[in-house]
Image: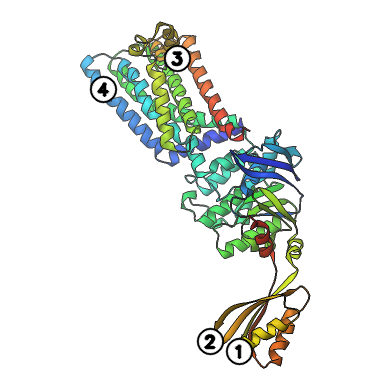
Amino acid sequence: MIEVRELTKSYGPTVAVNKVSFEAHAGEVLGFLGPNGAGKTTTMRILTCYLSADAGSATVAGYNIFEDSVEIRKRIGYLPESAPLYTDMGVIEYLNFMTQVRHIPKSERKERIRAVIDTCGLEDVIQKDIGELSKGYRQRLGLAQSLIHDPPILILDEPTSGLDPNQIIEIRNLIRDIGQEKLVLFSTHILSEVSATCTRILIINNGEIVANGTPEELASQAEGEEIVHIAIRGSQEAIEASLNELEFVSQWAHVETTDGIVVYQVNAPQGSDAAEALFHVVVQNGWSLTELRQESVDLEDVFLNLTDKQ
Amino acid sequence: MTNITAILKKEFRSYFNSPIAYIFITFFLGISSWLFFRGFFIQNQAEMRGFFGLMPWIFLFFIPAVTMKLWAEEKKIGTIEILMTLPIRDYEVVLGKFLASFALLAVSVLLSLVLTCSVVYLGDPDGGTLVAGYIGLLLMGGAYLAIGLFASTLTENQIIAFILGISTCFVLLIIGEDFVLFNAPNWLFPIFSYLGLGAHYSSILRGVLDSRDIIYYLSMIGLFLYLSTLAVESRKWR
């Protein structure tokens, strides 16, 4: 449904999006992950035909972004960053305006408005002016606006920013539901969000796509080492001596010592079961173990690895 | 067409949702009545010439205030991003916004008919001049609005939009005034006197609805709406 080829856009001398290519289909929830200023918003603005690209090509729902922008805009719902809304309008008045400009037939307008109010949980605020709404409700109304014409493609720019944890979960569930049959493209810089919601992740940094895959694929890319966090009560010298002797330990670091408890971070190659082996070492030496924890290599490391090179 | 009406209705309502419309109408009527009645009884003539004659200068300050928010505010709070990704063409939005501001102007002008009624009641003014005066007022107001709207597309700051609007209108107004015309070089004279915003209005005020004057205002409106559309589209220029 979305096909992007070598899309490039610069603002003066700064290249915001550099030769970005990817594809996305219905039934996918595509997470755009990247640090602030990576080019997520610019890419979305180009796909929604708000801005134009300098080079490259893209088709959305089968239409070219340069030639059929109106056709594309009919088929997408777009929630820009921080949900900009007309603060002097009422909630219903705003949704009603949206049904008009979205060409929803008069007979279906009420039904559509009701539907998005239910999906986005706006029931409590329908009497209010947008200016009186809290950040969370504005975000929901922005989402309601993007859903009102039941579009096959939904593009959301940081849809969960400014929401409280409960609301975040609601929105994520909503995105996942919608993503069952439609294409949802959303951006975020919160890592847990993509692994919780997306079927595929695009990591974008400095305007370039640096990774593209399912959350599992990306996580396995970064694996290769186990990291074990261990806290032991015992003699620091003896512990360090035996850490040096252990074959499977590729690297260790002393983290801190408090009240006779020494904390280390131990790195070992993948599959060496370092945590278990360390446990036996501790038992054999008669020390007492106060904490043993294997840190998983996850998206966070992938993200840091890929975006921290500069 | 549905798009244009939807935008028109939304913008027109938005004027009345905020205090802008009420303040505008109150001050417009207040100032024009005061300026009108100040001379009315002294001259002791049942005519509206004083009222109409002041309008180019009253519009100068009032109309950019009506148009300044139309684009600048959308840019400032970011709603333009939703607006311009709706399946609406840029010119439809420009036209819808222009018509909304024109509707507000028309309402204010309509309310000022109270003044006209009192003149008609007190004396026997020339009906033809009155009708021509109102038509001229709306045409000239339309041109001011289009200029103000264009100024608003250029910035996200309403104050700047307001000042830009006033200055553009002011320049276009005074180049047609006598004191500029007589000091201008000879070759500029016909250009200035044709382009002046107020000159065509004065000739309409004489009670002669000349097609040249109407065409002048319509083309000014067209030109500035076209420029506004270009300015809105400029975000997509490569």
Labels 3 & 1 near each other (Cβ < 8 A): no
Check the picture and name the quadrant holding the N terminus of chain B.
top right
Q: Amino acid at mark 2?
A: Asp
Q: Amino acid at mark 3?
A: Leu
Q: Which residue is mark 2?
A: A259
Could you say which disc has been placed on residue B132 in the image? Answer: none
Residue B28 is situated, as x and y percent measured from the top left of the image, at 35, 29
Crowd band around label 3 with a 10 angstrom C-alpha radius: few (<14), some (14–19), many (20+): some
Q: Which residue is mark 1?
A: A235
Q: Is residue A104 visible?
A: no
Labels 1 & 4 near each other (Cβ < 8 A): no
Where on the picture, by quarter, is residue B19?
A: top left
Q: CA distance from mark 2 to mark 3?
A: 88 Å
Mark 1 or mark 2, which has the lower sequence index?
1
Against A255, residue B72 (above or below) is above
Q: CA distance from mark 3 to mark 1?
A: 94 Å
Towards the viewer: A191 or B223:
A191
Q: Residue at x 58, y 86 (%)?
A: A261
Q: Which residue is mark 3?
A: B195
